[in-house]
Image (cartoon, coloured by chain):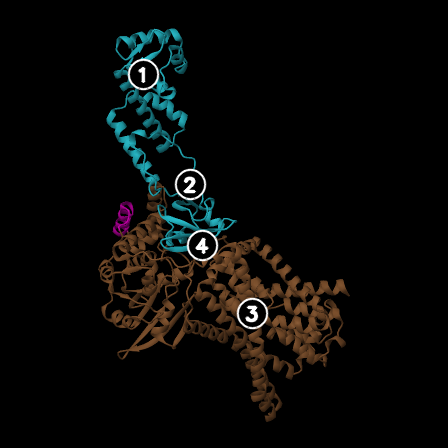
Amino acid sequence: MKIALLGNPGVGKSLIFNQLTGLGVEVNRYPGSSVALECGNICYKQERTEIVDLPGIYSLDGNSEEETLVRTFLTSGGADVIVAVLDATKLERNLYLFVQAAEFSPKMIAVVNMIDAAERQGMHIDAGTLSSHLGVPVILAAASEGRNIDRILPVALGQATPARVHVPYDHHIEAALKSLEKTIGTPMHTNLLALQGTGDDPVLLDAAGAIAQEIGMRHRMSVGQIIATNRHNFAREITAAVVKRTARKKPYDLDSLLTRTFPGIPILCTILFLLLLSVFLIGSWMEGIIVAAFTTSIIIPFTALALPSLWDQIGFSLLIALQAGFGIAFPFVFTFYIGLSLLEDTGYMTRAAFLADRAMHRIGLHGEAIIPMVIGFGCTVPAVMSLRLLKTRREQTIAAVLVTMIPCSARTVVIAGIVAAFVGILWAFSIYLIVFVLLILTAVVLSRITPGEQFGMIVEMSTLRRPQARLVLAKSWLRIKEFLFIAMPVLIVTSILLGLFQYFGLTELFEQMVAPVTVTLLGLPGYASTALLFGVFRKELAFETLAVLAGTADLGSVMTSVQLYTFAIVSVLFVPCVSTIAVLYRQLGARIAIITSVYTVFLGFFIGAIINILMK
Amino acid sequence: MQPSLREDYLEAVQLFSEKNTRFPLTEELAAALFKTVPVVRSDMAELVSSGDVIVTADGVITLTGQGKQTGTSVMKKHETLQCFLSEILGMDSILASDEACTLEHAVSDETIDRLGKLIVTRDHYRHQGKGNRHKPAGDRTCRVEKDEFCQSPSISEFSEGEEVIIQCIHGRACAQRLLDLGLVPGERAVIKRRLSNGAVVVQVKGCDVAVSPEIASAIGVERSP
């Protein structure tokens, strides 16, 4: 048996999914889509049952990746039973999706979640009446308290039936649906979509398009608007019949602070600053502990083994890669994910997006893009992974290039370790300044040349609520697993390759090959190219390798200030690390990964050369 | 006298009296119909004898009950025909008016009735969902709207706390998501927040929806009564 959870974003689907499946969750990707589907297997009455958490959507009519995915899922009979999760406090709006899903006539049950919140607002929902209106079993549940969650599986497996709802569409639409069904023989839900221009049957689309135009002319209103209005009105009638309201005193509305320009924007800046600061502080503290523990307990015993030198080199590279992975993943990325999940689960993220929209708009993006940008200061890999939040390909492309340019925590280490330490603190800030100027210039150019339509922002403000520690941790854990899954293999392979590279003495060959660029163009010592190469592997390695190759930790004594400054700015700007390239490839395809890499290499060398020429 | 000429006179007098809230002098009627005063004066004598008009001593032409009925009926026919020709058949409005002047004398009451209903239906659909009450049929005249769909001000032009009724959503690209979130024509919405750049948070169906300025400008609304 396969059960799928369907619902609007923020109705508590994830929490229900989490409570139903426990820990055995895996993330699958639908073929040809970057949308993640969470799946979990459980055993119920000696039968294996698979539960799928479909992405949260508002409608089945749209063409976003999520909507298309859920639609394909429904038409292809992806699940035996659909569990429609509805938010009790927003029942009317949630029923809109329910009636759409019902048109695909899968076996369904309805779970009205957050009944506790609804009761607090003075709303009483009559489950019996709702069930008779919808024609499916209805469960009133409160996932945050675990109320009635245990009833979902038995009811879903035992009593699910196709819903008996029929939206009374405008008579022209009804006539069009009947005539399409008669002439072409397609079912109603396909015809409804075709009238709105979605579908893959050219004959049907052609016929439906002509009818839709006619109806649109008659009503002076697009068919999409008529259909949506009919559905909303139907949902309103059901809601009116099942919800009884008693007046309650309205609680204090925090939004009067959060969404205003003042004090909203200062609050936003403070929250983001505190997030970055705490991630940086907690991260470096934990990184120190993890790296030290790793070194003393694993690396030192390993080198003490004194294996044959080739194996020693491979083993050492492997261990270094693991150390790097864990040294970044847990301290920085995991902390960041916890902070991010907190912001999401409290519902603050949508407020932040609303406030940030104005600034983001100037660079061809929208409010939601603030999330990847902020994550980018921590680590580029999760920032790129979060790009899927953005709706259009255009925004994803622009944001991908920008996010890879934002100085992540590893690049902060390079700037601090080389420039702040040996050249001067103000020079270190000037690097940030240069990066931000380049970032904005790139953004302005990209927003002009990137093809695609500019799409404004429409977000539903999620309800402000207390986050659930369990859910925050589960979410962060799932994300860090995804991070390790992407980053770890790349780190290990690159590390071993670099180790072999060094072992067979290819470093000198490489240095000679790239000498025209590094020595002539950038004015750096030959060994700096190897250090830059290592920086591709992990940014702060550029700094560490440089010290090793220079033979002294006091870099100021072997390189001039200009050389150090050039080296730092090149390694900050050029090529995102291999993990970033891997995740760019995975999320956005080879083209974007190559363009971004080539652009940043070019930018790094170009700016490096200019600085070298100007300051020499 | 030709019946069409009689109808033209009565229509012109009725039109003048509705426009100026008084009856015309012979000279004024002559000017309105591009005729000479003596011709009009002699024609008026005929109309007085058929009991359609009364000419007072100072030259004012007043309609009798019978004259007024004919004049009004012809005027309505003209309006309906002109409306049909220009708005539904898409003819140029001046040409349509000329054509209506010829047709109005021959057309039957039934045809006018049915044409009238057709136009009312279209008018009705155009305003469906607009939230405002339909005008009574008798009062309807031919209005040609410049913007085909909606001329309501955008939601950004209202201030925080105001309750509005959504009239229309321009543009195709962003419409779907708005519709899905319940921002459909006819729906009530409260503006919860409005930033200076025109971005708004609207409460609709109990949910708060944040909308960026360029999309807010595509949402036409009217103040809720």
Residue closest to the far bottom: A305
- Image point 34% across, 67% down: which residue? A5
Q: Which residue is mark 1?
A: B10
Region rendered in magenta: A168-183
Real-space Cα distance between discs 2 and 4? 20 Å
Q: Which mark is residue A378?
A: 3
Q: Are marks 2 and 4 on the same chain?
A: yes
**Which chain is indicated by disc 2?**
B
Q: Chain of mark 4?
A: B
> Which amino acid does the dot numbered 3 rest on?
Gly
Q: Which chain letter goes with mark 1?
A: B
Sequence-wise, the earlier of marks 1 and 4 is: 1
Is B45 magenta? The answer is no
Chain under callout 3: A
The local secondary structure at tag 2 comes to: loop
Label total for image: 4
Report the residue that reaches farthest toward the right: A616
Q: Nearer the viewer, residue B177 or A125?
A: A125
The residue under label 4 is which amino acid type? Ala
Residue A571, percent from left and from top: 65, 70
Both marks 1 and 2 on one chain: yes
Instruction: Say which mark, if any, is on residue B152.
Output: 2
- Residue A179 among magenta residues: yes
Identify the residue position indicated by label 4 in the image: B210
Q: What secondary structure is marked by label 3?
A: helix
The answer to whether marks 1 and 2 mark residues whose Cβ atoms lie closer than 8 Å is no
Q: Position of residue A423 (x, y in %)?
A: 73, 70
Q: Quadrant of residue A289?
A: bottom right
